């Protein structure tokens, strides 16, 4: 829907932030009518928040398709045996485990999908001709988090994009891994957080020297990163404990910051293909282990991070790319019947021009409240139509970050969007 | 992606149907490379199946937006207390229940969302001005089914569209309920199953005389319906046991058929607003109970039903509206180097013309196998480019349901799509 009347919108702002919520992202998103908290770490995306969520999903999807990813959808219900095979059934405390009443099968709720995709790919008896292969999904993950105090930055149920890559050899795996870095940069760029987001060296586990996280600097972060003044990458705490220098350039000119991990890329090598016996037949007809990579982005976490670094004392300031609507058109109460007429005309022209517009047509709401709510909701542009603006034969236009509004003649407003 | 080369497609057909699968939909969908079975009642949608799934989702979404629905997304993790309030925590055997390791909270996996949306809507303190209100989502549901032998017709985890409507009075609820019938008809029409799908009278529970199911006649159905020869609606078994006549016209000229419930619409009245104290303030400032309706469609079940009634001995026959691709372009092995060149030209022209095309460019596959796989996958149109067709300066075009192919000149093929 390009145009929506606010009188019909289910999402609405709250006068006060919920008392039991300490994180800025959840306080702002709940007050703005974007999300609702069902219980700690579990949230509903209301119509306004759902629009943001879908825009983020589409930004990520576009890049994954560019990266030759094929989209699929794996289940959340996982059989115990898959998790036993990798030894993670007992070691992963965050795994929700339970038993089916009828079948008595032990099940887990997927916190990630290596245990599902590896045996799935094995079923297709790959040959060298079928590789490399890139598969991704947007799927809900479930993690029984010890603490869930960071709003949608750390939820117990959350949507994630996970791409898994399958390769014939290390060189191919390395090349794809490197090619994913500019893709991730594009995504964070489009979401308006690139300038605060650092490629961060992390441990590569037992198989690779390094993996990489994408860490966005914000006081809401639960992680600590060390940003190198020389080469503008960062290292996480784990890396620092090993050796307190930047892994890229060796410099020790490092600045400590709190940050949120908004994405990660990881060379899995044969960590999962080995337990599931995932091989391919090479040119000589010999069986070789498939090497894997994985590439994750949490959608809620990304949305929460965008909010953490794009807000002021009045509310959220959405980057245009992910804003639920581009324009907040506000009609003020007036004795002049032309006000409603002109506002409706503008609403229709904007929608016709494919501009996403939320039209505050509510009659029982004061001017002050309309402005306060608009700031809270944080759409990129506000257009006000009132008796005063019509006296100047115009509408008042203001960017969410701008201090001053300007009057633009009615005939010309549409050309600004 | 409009065009896809089959050499790159992860989904692939299997020579034989899986031995442990008895339902036709699962056998055909697994053999065709559309889905994979993780365990009984739990399936992965592979890239080819995922495309069908998304098309069905979009057909439904379009109608729900037309019905003024606002999309949101509720969680799958539900707190016990919500289910205790409606008395369903203990009575619903299909509820997956478990305990969080860390918080010790008792949780359920949502099999439906009345228990979540009713208290959610209550939080917004509705007045008469806010009603009616229509909210919908596409969300995974979880049901601990006793038996799951019908493929994706009865899964333990499945995507569902559920719309909930909120009303001021019975008249408003009734009107919206009636307005949903043509919407559902549109959906089943677009999915190519309308002619076998019957509006079916079902029990309205303790609050309404009737609710309605949409039942599609197929031998795979787990339900029995009774179709009235006079008025072309049906009644389910429950209704028949009460009184063996058609509830619409009173006729007893009824024909018994097996059928699958592909959707349902239900007047909930205050069944859920009452336990959650969901009221609205009327024009006089008095609190009145909100009346509710709910409207469900299972996406996997709909997809499975489409397959059950659209197949032949060779495989699936997708209706064009939900086919993963419209055209299957097949290049046959040839000494004539023009074959590959012309096939690639055609592939590019089709994609440029926004025709979704799967291009079988594989070199190590025989002609017989290519044709057999194409029939199994069931795309609406097959275009073959071979030495033989080029000798006739054309390509061979055949509809999946057609017996005979026809040669169309190369320059003209594109105009047929």
Image (spheres, coloured by chain):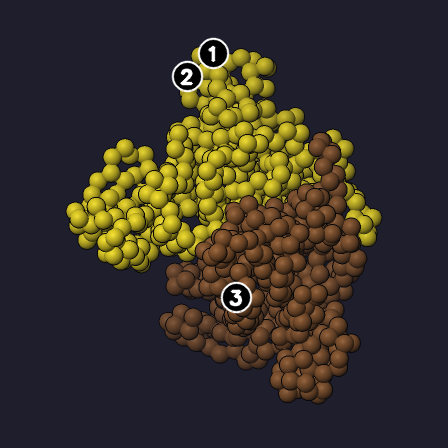
Chain colours: A yellow, B brown
Q: Callout 1: helix, strand or loop?
A: loop
Image quarter for residue A107?
top right
Chain letter of the residue carrying label 3: B
* Residue B371, placed above or below residue A285: below
Whole-number angstrom distance, CA of label 3 to CA of label 2 = 64 Å
Chain letter of the residue carrying label 2: A
Residue drawn 23% across the image and 49% down it: A387
Residue B58 seen anywhere in this rendered image of the structure: no
Number of marks in the rendered image? 3
In-image side of A321 versus B15 (left or right) = left
Chain letter of the residue carrying label 1: A
Q: Callout 2: helix, strand or loop?
A: loop
Residue A252 circle label: 1
Nearer the viewer's eye, disc 3 or disc 1? 3
In-image side of A407 versus A297 (left or right) = left
Nearer the viewer's eye, disc 3 or disc 2? 3
Residue count near mark 2 (Cα–Cα under 10 Å), binned few <14, some 14–19, many ≥20: some
Residue drawn 79% across the image and 45% down it: A99
Say which of B2 and A240 sits in front. A240
Residue drawn 70% across the image and 48% down it: B85
* Residue A301, placed above or below residue B128: above
Which residue is disc 2 drawn over?
A229
Residue count near mark 1 (Cα–Cα under 10 Å), binned few <14, some 14–19, many ≥20: some
Residue drawn 55% across the image and 53% down it: B287
Residue A11 seen anywhere in this rendered image of the structure: yes
Residue B172 circle label: 3
Point out residue B349 in the picture as x, y percentages from the top left corner: 39, 63
Q: Say if labels 3 and 1 share a chain.
A: no
Image quarter for residue B228?
bottom right
Q: Callout 3: helix, strand or loop?
A: helix
């Amino acid at each position: 829907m390009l145009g929506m009347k606010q009188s019909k919108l289910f999402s609405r702002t709250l006068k006060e932030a919920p008392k039991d919520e300490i994180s800025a992202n959840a306080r702002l998103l709940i007050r703005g009518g974007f999300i609702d908290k069902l219980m700690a770490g579990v949230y509903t995306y209301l119509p306004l928040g759902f629009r943001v969520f879908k825009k983020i999903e589409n930004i990520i999807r576009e890049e994954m398709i560019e990266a030759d990813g094929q989209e699929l959808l794996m289940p959340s219900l996982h059989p115990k045996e898959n998790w036993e095979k990798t030894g993670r059934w007992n070691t992963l405390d965050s795994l929700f485990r339970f038993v089916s009443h009828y079948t008595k099968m032990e099940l887990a709720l997927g916190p990630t999908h290596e245990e599902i995709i590896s045996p799935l790919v094995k079923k297709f008896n790959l040959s060298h001709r079928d590789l490399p292969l890139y598969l991704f999904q947007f799927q809900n993950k479930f993690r029984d988090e010890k603490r869930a105090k960071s709003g949608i930055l750390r939820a117990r149920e959350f949507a994630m994009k996970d791409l898994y890559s399958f390769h014939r050899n290390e060189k191919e795996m390395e090349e794809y891994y490197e090619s994913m870095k500019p893709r991730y940069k594009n995504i964070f760029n489009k979401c308006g957080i690139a300038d605060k987001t650092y490629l961060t060296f992390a441990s590569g586990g037992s198989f690779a020297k390094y993996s990489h996280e994408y860490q966005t600097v914000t006081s809401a972060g639960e992680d600590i990163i060390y940003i190198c003044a020389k080469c503008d990458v960062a290292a996480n705490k784990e890396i620092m404990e090993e050796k307190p220098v930047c892994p890229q350039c060796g410099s020790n000119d490092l600045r400590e910051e709190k940050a949120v991990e908004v994405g990660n890329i990881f060379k899995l090598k044969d960590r999962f293909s080995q337990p599931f016996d995932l091989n391919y037949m090479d040119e000589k007809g010999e069986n070789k282990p498939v090497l894997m990579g994985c590439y994750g982005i949490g959608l809620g976490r990304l949305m929460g991070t965008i909010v953490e670094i794009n807000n002021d004392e009045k509310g959220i300031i959405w980057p245009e790319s992910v804003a639920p609507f581009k324009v907040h058109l506000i009609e003020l109460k007036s004795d002049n019947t032309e006000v409603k007429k002109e506002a409706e005309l503008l609403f229709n022209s904007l929608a016709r021009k494919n501009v996403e517009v939320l039209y505050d047509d509510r009659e029982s709401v004061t001017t002050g409240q309309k402005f306060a709510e608009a700031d809270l909701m944080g759409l990129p542009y506000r257009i006000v139509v009132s008796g005063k603006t019509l006296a100047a034969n115009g509408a008042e236009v203001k960017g969410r970050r701008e201090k001053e509004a300007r009057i633009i003649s009615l005939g010309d407003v549409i050309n600004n969007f």
